[in-house]
């Protein structure tokens, strides 16, 4: 039996990632698309041979016999649509950041639990082969203890990615700027690999983006429960080249991911004569046209629904990333260090 899918929000992420990844699977049928701009839904419906198009997600959920939905709308709508779908018996894959507050995230997780349904969050960085392998390398002890890290995600801004992306700049719809858009990926990644963040100290600013009520740049120090500390930088003003790399500085050397163009994952050893080791992994995805390929998110979602795999990014994991970002926002606003446990 095929998993019957509906996709709410037919903008950039639906077009570049969700729809092609669903369409590549034999065990999925894309049954309906929904966007408040009907022409967008119709255009993608034509491309993917989808029979039904809606402008109201409630109608789509009520009229179609779906098993699951992807929620690919602006951030402020994630919780509303997710909770509605879960209450109607559908599994949900919601884009990152999963919600705009802890209260919303808590309700989403609780509704999924009560209804015994899958709730997955589109935090795709932890699924990238280079990051999966980096975690294994660190766990193997090859690099010794991790002392500190640096992780960066910056590009020229969402206006280069999405035609309808004005909402990214509006605090009411996005709740935060580069931190919510890019930082949430990186705090998820470092928590996936290293453990939980317990304290943050963050600066944010809006340096270039006009008519923007959110940050276009942020720099934060992240401290983890296990004592590791590092920094995250996020930016919508890095041009013309995107940065999406992470470096772990360890007892026995340095491990770099998506930093060197010829070596997506590379270890440098401190021991004299040992040199460097380049691992065979694909480059990281970029926001640029040529940079799209399967993220593994849809595979993870469908396999979790089919019961063949554990949810690779549960609601609880998505909430952890959101919480760290909310702590960064609070730190920047109050000009002090913030304990993650303060954010509820
Ligand atoms: N995982 C990733 O790497 C990644 C990358 C980019 C964006 N995203 C996330 O995906 C989400 C969407 O981002 P995007 O870049 O596709 O934005 P976008 O503006 O291109 O697309 C959003 C779409 O939602 C539609 N929409 C708005 N309100 C709606 C409603 N009530 N019902 C149905 N449709 C509605 C808009 O018309 C638009 O087509 C955001 O949460 C963003 O953070 C994730």
Image: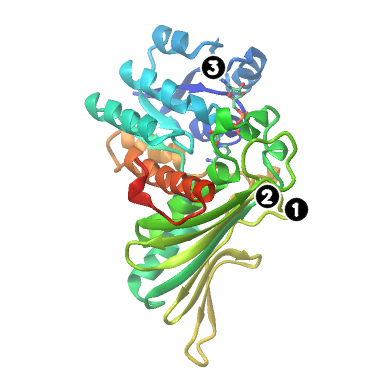
Give residue 239's mark.
1
Residue 105 image offset from top left, x and y in percent: 37, 33
Q: Is residue 340 among the parts visible in the rendering?
A: yes
Display colour scheme: rainbow
Q: Is mark 3 within 8 Å of ligand 1?
A: yes
Residue closer to the observer: 273 or 147: 147
Question: Residue 8: x, y in percent?
Answer: 51, 21
Q: In which quarter of the image is the N terminus?
A: top left
User: In whole angstroms, how far apart are the C-alphas of marks 3 and 1?
Assistant: 33 Å
Residue highlighted by disc 2: 155
Q: Does the residue labelled 1 lie within 8 Å of ligand 1?
A: no
Would you name the residue on which mark 3 appears? 34
> If the image is split into quadrants, where does the C terminus sit?
top left
Residue 283 visible in the picture? no
Label 1–label 2 contact, CB within 8 A: yes
Please tell me in which quadrant of the rendered image residue 226 appears.
bottom left
Left or right of 39 in this view: 57: left
Q: Distance between the residues labelled 3 and 2?
A: 29 Å
Label 1: state its secondary structure: loop
Residue at 35%, 47% (x, y): give it. 342
């Amino acid at each position: 039996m095929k998993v019957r899918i509906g996709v709410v929000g037919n903008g950039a992420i639906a077009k570049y990632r969700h729809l092609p990844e669903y369409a590549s699977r034999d065990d999925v049928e894309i049954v309906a698309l929904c966007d408040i701009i009907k022409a967008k839904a119709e255009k993608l419906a034509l491309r993917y041979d989808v029979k039904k198009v809606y402008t109201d997600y409630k109608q789509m959920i009520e009229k179609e016999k779906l098993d699951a939905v992807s929620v690919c709308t602006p951030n402020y709508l994630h919780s509303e649509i997710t909770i509605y779908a879960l209450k109607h018996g559908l599994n949900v894959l919601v884009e990152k950041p999963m919600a705009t507050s802890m209260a919303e995230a808590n309700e989403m997780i609780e509704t999924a639990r009560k209804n015994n349904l899958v709730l997955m969050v589109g935090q795709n960085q932890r699924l990238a082969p280079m990051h999966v392998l980096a975690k294994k390398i660190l766990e193997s002890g090859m690099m010794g203890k991790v002392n500190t890290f640096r992780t960066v995600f910056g590009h020229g801004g969402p206006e280069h990615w999405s035609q309808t992306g004005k909402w990214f700049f509006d605090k009411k719809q996005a709740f935060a700027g580069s931190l919510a858009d890019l930082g949430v990926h990186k705090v998820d990644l470092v928590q996936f690999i290293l453990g939980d963040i317990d304290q943050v100290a963050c600066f944010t600013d809006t340096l270039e983006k006009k008519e923007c009520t959110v940050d276009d740049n942020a720099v934060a120090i992240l401290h983890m429960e296990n004592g590791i500390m590092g920094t995250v930088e996020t930016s919508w003003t890095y041009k013309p080249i995107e940065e999406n790399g992470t470096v772990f500085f360890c007892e026995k050397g340095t491990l770099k991911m998506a930093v060197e163009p010829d070596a997506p994952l590379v270890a440098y050893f401190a021991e004299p004569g040992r040199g460097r080791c380049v691992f065979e992994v694909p480059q990281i995805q970029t926001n640029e046209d040529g940079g799209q390929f399967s993220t593994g998110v849809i595979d993870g979602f469908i396999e979790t629904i089919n019961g063949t795999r554990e949810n690779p990014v549960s609601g609880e994991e998505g909430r952890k990333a959101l919480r760290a970002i909310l702590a960064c926002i609070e730190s920047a606003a109050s000009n002090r260090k913030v304990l993650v446990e303060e954010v509820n």
